[in-house]
């Protein structure tokens, strides 16, 4: 578990391409993107799980900002929370997301977007 004052408690991608296959991330903490923070890059998750993670601002599991692109296939986002918005996923600044055969369950946010 990474420091709770950073972006991306497990992975912080700044303009890079990240691909995770058959990956499990649990109990991550961060300001934005508790498990994964992507700034201007791309993210591909396949058959993976992110659970029990918390952001003190946005993106209880994943935060995508600055025109990031993400594809999630066969992904489970479970029991993630964000104090402000995007309990599971937070998207901003023209970021794009494609969800395929994925599940978002028991995610919460304090102000807007319990899931997205």
Image (tube, rainbow, N blue to C red):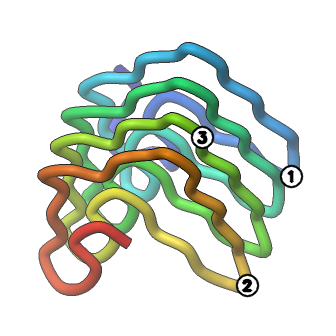
Q: Which residue is mark 2?
A: 94
Task: State the residue at coordinates (56%, 57%).
Answer: 99
Residues at marks 1 and 3 touching, judged by CB atoms closer than 8 Å: no
The mark that comes first in sequence, 3 or 2, is 3
Viewport quadrant of the C terminus: bottom left
Task: State the residue at coordinates (37%, 55%).
Answer: 31
- 99 relative position to 29: left or right: right
Task: State the residue at coordinates (80%, 50%).
Answer: 42
In the image, 75 versus 38, the foreground residue is: 75
The mark that comes first in sequence, 2 or 1, is 1
The mark that comes first in sequence, 1 or 3, is 1
State the CA–CA distance, disc 2 to disc 1.
14 Å
Task: State the residue at coordinates (65%, 19%).
Answer: 21
- 80 relative position to 106: left or right: right
State the CA–CA distance, disc 1 to disc 3.
21 Å
Find residue 98 and report its horizontal and vertical position in percent: 65, 61
Q: Few, some or many C-alpha atoms within 10 Å of disc 1 (few <14, some 14-19, many ≥20)?
A: some
Count of all numbered marks drawn on residues in the image: 3
Mark 3 element type: strand
Q: Which residue is mark 1?
A: 15
- Say which quarter of the image contains residue 111: bottom left
- Say which quarter of the image contains residue 77: top left
The residue mark sitting in front, 2 or 1, is 2
The residue mark sitting in front, 1 or 3, is 3
Residue 73's disc is 3
């Amino acid at each position: 578990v990474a420091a709770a004052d950073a972006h991306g408690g497990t992975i912080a991608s700044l303009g890079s391409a990240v691909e995770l296959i058959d990956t499990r991330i649990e109990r991550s903490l961060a300001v934005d993107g508790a498990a994964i923070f992507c700034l201007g890059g791309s993210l591909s998750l396949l058959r993976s799980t992110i659970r029990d993670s918390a952001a003190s601002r946005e993106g209880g599991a994943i935060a995508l900002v600055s025109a990031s692109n993400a594809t999630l296939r066969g992904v489970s986002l479970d029991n993630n929370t964000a104090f402000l918005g995007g309990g599971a996923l937070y998207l901003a600044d023209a970021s794009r997301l494609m969800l395929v055969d994925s599940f978002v369950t028991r995610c919460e946010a304090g102000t807007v977007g319990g899931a997205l």
